Image: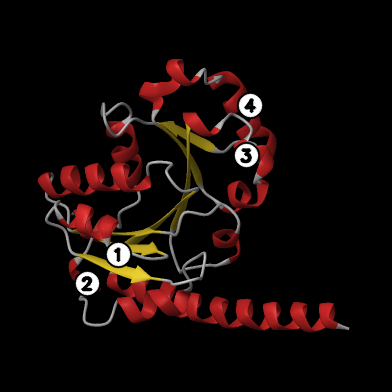
Amino acid sequence: MNTPRILEVRKGILKKNDQLARGLRQRFREAGVFVVNLVSSPGAGKTSLLQKSLLVLREQGYHVAALVGDLATENDARRLAQSGAPVRQISTGTTCHLEAEMIGRALKGWSLETLDLLFIENVGNLVCPASYDLGENLRAVLFSVTEGEDKPLKYPTIFNSADVAVLTKMDLADVAGFNRRLALENIQKVRPGMTVLETSARGEQGLTAWLAFLQKQIPVSKTS
């Protein structure tokens, strides 16, 4: 008797989230800001890659900002704020993902029209975030060489819901015994044709390609 009730509650929650996400997407479209949702397991390197991205993009003259989701602490937000970009923390408590309603609340008082790119660093989790649309234009799923080549096979839903896969910490690939070929094959098994970028925030490997990929997404009106 409990199972149908649980399913109905979940459907209701997701329906509400989808409605709010559609509103956010329209708001982002009208403001001309491109929104990137970064998802990964804990420790995959989201914050390091984002910190480097904010720094370089600002140096290139782009107007960027970030929302950071975490269960507790504002450590990541403080790190990202060192880039000079506007950053806001979203503390989710026991919730293992960000939701559209949280994004809407965090954006209060921000002038989105002044931004080219808005990054959303989701809570470290490869399960829950897959089901929650945040109104983003692009979802990037990150996984590091230290996590193993079978991540896409273990968590196919998040890879199927993402637009691009980013391999991180490539400078540690040899030390970790990472099988690059197998990892790429596993990604394509789950999501044939998916774009894959290889990066190392510490050594800046692949950073130029990653940023060029993002820059192509920015609305023409913002770059003209």
In three-dimensional space, the C-alpha distance between marks 1 and 2, rounded to whole angstroms, equals 7 Å
Q: Which residue is mark 1?
A: 33
Amino acid at dot 1? Val
Q: Which sits earlier in the primary sequence, circle 2 or circle 4? A: 2
Q: Which sits earlier in the primary sequence, circle 3 or circle 2? A: 2
Amino acid at dot 4? Glu
Amino acid at dot 2? Glu
Amino acid at dot 3? Pro
Compare residues 127 and 175 and report the one nearer the observer.
175
| Residue 49 position by quadrant | top left
- Residue drawn at point x = 23 percent, y = 42 percent: 52
Q: Which sits earlier in the primary sequence, circle 3 or circle 4? A: 3
Q: Is residue 171 left or right of residue 124?
A: left
Q: Report if the CB atoms under discs 1 and 2 are less than 8 Å apart.
A: yes
Q: Is residue 65 above or below residue 104?
A: above
Residue 68 place in picture, x, y as percent: 33, 62
Compare residues 94 and 65 and report the one nearer the observer.
94
Mark 2: secondary structure: helix
Q: Which residue is mark 4?
A: 185
Residue 152 shows which numbered tag?
3
- Residue drawn at point x = 33 percent, y = 46 percent: 214
Q: Report if the CB atoms under discs 1 and 4 are less than 8 Å apart.
A: no
In three-dimensional space, the C-alpha distance between marks 3 and 4, rounded to whole angstroms, equals 10 Å
Q: Which sits earlier in the primary sequence, circle 1 or circle 4? A: 1
Residue 22 place in picture, x, y as percent: 49, 76
In three-dimensional space, the C-alpha distance between marks 1 and 4, rounded to whole angstroms, equals 33 Å
Other residues around mark 1 within 10 Å, as few (<14) / some (14–19) / many (≥20): many
Q: Is residue 74 above or below residue 182?
A: below
